[in-house]
């Protein structure tokens, strides 16, 4: 019964990506896939650091990043609470601009390494499909096929 | 009939030491972190067999010495110490051999080491089992109430020690210290065990990164069974304290064999805790849990647990400055141990040693 309720976060300890960044990324992914919804609580900093066996500052840093991005709320009494999910409405223009900046870098890496645009788009669709549980926009599918 | 009181602990320690390799998660044989795929490596099987022969030999040898010398106090204490030292040495030999093979053959080479947490364990935690805590709390409150009501009517001289037949063989004046001293002991003992049960429920969830879906369930059962067992232990301790006090205050008179309850009930409590921890296994490793199909976790064979050997001194003592955990599951043992990098751990150790040592001192000072 509780098996389904598990909400797993896994961090790679020897990765070049800093642990706080990995933690932030995993939580963003959980929100995107619907595992975490607006209003869901996250563990207390100390408790999460204890379970992962990592420094409390690392968890604090990840939570702080998420707060700056407007994805979670940090309250003294409530702790960390998810404050945004796909149902919360469209992002602000500045957020889209910021995201586009990051997407540009990611796509540049694909192009620089010679991944054909069609392949790149296919990967993007698969990943988007993972998050939206197969409900990818058919319009997008049509565009790439043409 | 000659009684050998030390024989029981010697055999129990031997049995637990013999069982231990089967009670710990398969990714930490003899306190060495390994990828699960190596769990059946020849070196591990060989070392486990050697360790078990060794434990059997040490236990039998120590038991034979105790039987031959008639189980006299200073010697029997030494016998238990010798048994523990022998078990420790056998563990170290096995651990060194497995560690050497692990480094020589690069068991972690090319594998991705990960740490896993299940946030649902914290946002939807196991509730504190108040119903299981109730017996020990009610018995302790009852003892305090009876002590207060009975104090004005006590005779000048109290029986404070009873022989096996239930006859008083030592007396003390019915002063505040002698009446409320044992009651205070019961209150502190109950509070410590109830507090420990609460700490156990919040203890570090060391999840197996190779099977994270079932690891969360294992952790839940491990801590909830452990906490309940501790509360049963607390109830047993309270029963023994209450019976002793009632006998001292001449409210009941237990003859043999009922008088033996005072000794048997706490032993029963220890037995319950050990039996539950053996049944569940460290971190719930002995529980059979079927992963639900389609639970969504793709099994990536290249993912393994983090090699955390460096935080376990001599394979038994946890010291990790980065980890804010206080209570962590034993690496090679039953139940939980302390993160010695936390100042609170040292405070607990000081209190554990200090309270029993300090109580007679305070008693002596008051008199």
Image: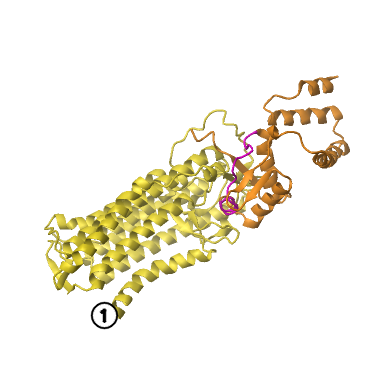
Q: In which quadrant of the rendered view does residue B112 lie?
A: top right
Task: Give the chain ID for the yellow colour.
Answer: B
Mark 1 lies on residue? B367
Tally of marks? 1
Read off the chain for label 1: B
Residue B227 in sight: yes
Dot 1 falls on a residue whose secondary structure is loop
Region of the chain picked out in magenta, as a range:
A34-50
Q: In which quadrant of the rendered view does residue B222 lie?
A: top left
Residue B47 placement, left or right of A128: left
Quadrant where the N terminus of chain B lies? bottom left
Q: Is residue A48 magenta?
A: yes
Residue found 64% across the figure and 38% down from its top:
A38
Q: Is residue B296 magenta?
A: no
Q: Could you say which is closer to the camera, residue B146 or residue B254?
A: B146
Chain A in the picture: what colour? orange
Percent of width and height locating residue B145: 25, 60
Q: Could you say which is closer to the camera, residue A78 or residue A61?
A: A78
Residue A4 placement, left or right of B130: right
Residue B97 placement, left or right of B356: right
Residue found 70% across the figure and 47% down from its top:
A66
């Amino acid at each position: 019964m509780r098996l389904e309720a598990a909400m797993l976060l896994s961090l790679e300890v020897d990765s070049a990506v800093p642990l706080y960044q990995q933690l932030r990324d995993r939580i963003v992914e959980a929100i995107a896939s619907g595992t975490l919804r607006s209003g869901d609580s996250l563990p207390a900093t100390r408790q999460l650091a204890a379970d992962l066996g990592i420094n409390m500052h690392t968890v604090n840093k990840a939570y702080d990043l998420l707060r700056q991005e407007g994805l979670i709320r940090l309250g003294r009494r409530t702790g960390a609470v998810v404050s945004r999910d796909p149902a919360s409405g469209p992002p602000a223009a500045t957020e889209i601009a910021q995201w586009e900046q990051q997407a540009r870098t990611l796509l540049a890496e694909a192009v620089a390494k010679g991944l054909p645009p069609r392949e790149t788009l296919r990967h993007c669709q698969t990943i988007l499909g993972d998050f939206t549980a197969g409900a990818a926009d058919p319009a997008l599918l049509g565009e790439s096929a043409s | 009939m000659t009684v050998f009181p030390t024989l029981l602990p010697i055999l129990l320690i031997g049995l637990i030491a013999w069982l231990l390799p089967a009670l710990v998660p398969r990714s930490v044989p003899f306190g060495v972190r390994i990828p699960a795929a190596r769990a059946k490596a020849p070196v591990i099987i060989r070392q486990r067999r050697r360790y078990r022969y060794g434990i059997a030999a040490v236990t039998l040898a120590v038991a034979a010495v105790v039987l031959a010398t008639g189980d006299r106090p200073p010697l029997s204490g030494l016998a238990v110490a010798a048994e523990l030292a022998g078990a420790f040495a056998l563990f170290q030999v096995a651990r060194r051999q497995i560690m050497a093979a692990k480094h020589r053959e690069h068991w972690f080479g090319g594998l991705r080491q990960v740490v896993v947490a299940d946030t649902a364990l914290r946002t939807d935690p196991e509730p504190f089992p108040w119903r299981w805590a109730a017996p020990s709390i009610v018995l302790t409150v009852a003892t305090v109430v009876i002590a207060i009501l009975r104090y004005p009517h006590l005779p000048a001289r109290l029986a404070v020690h009873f022989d096996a037949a239930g006859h008083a063989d030592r007396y003390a004046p019915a002063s505040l210290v002698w009446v409320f001293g044992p009651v205070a002991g019961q209150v502190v003992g109950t509070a410590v065990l109830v507090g420990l049960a609460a700490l156990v429920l919040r203890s570090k969830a060391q999840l197996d990164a190779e099977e994270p879906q079932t690891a969360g369930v294992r952790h839940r059962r491990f801590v909830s069974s452990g906490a309940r067992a501790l509360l049963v232990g607390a109830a047993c301790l309270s029963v023994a304290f209450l019976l002793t006090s009632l006998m001292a205050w001449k409210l009941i008179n237990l003859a043999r064999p009922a008088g033996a309850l005072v000794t048997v009930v706490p032993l029963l409590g220890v037995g319950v805790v050990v039996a539950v921890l053996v049944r569940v296994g460290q971190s719930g490793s002995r529980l059979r849990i079927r992963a639900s199909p389609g639970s969504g976790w793709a099994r990536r064979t290249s993912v393994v647990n983090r090699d955390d050997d460096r935080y376990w001194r001599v394979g038994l003592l946890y010291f990790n400055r980065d980890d804010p955990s206080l209570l962590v599951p034993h690496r090679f043992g039953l139940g939980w141990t302390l993160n010695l990098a936390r100042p609170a751990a040292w405070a607990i150790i000081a209190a554990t040693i200090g309270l029993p040592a300090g109580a007679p001192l305070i008693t002596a000072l008051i008199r």
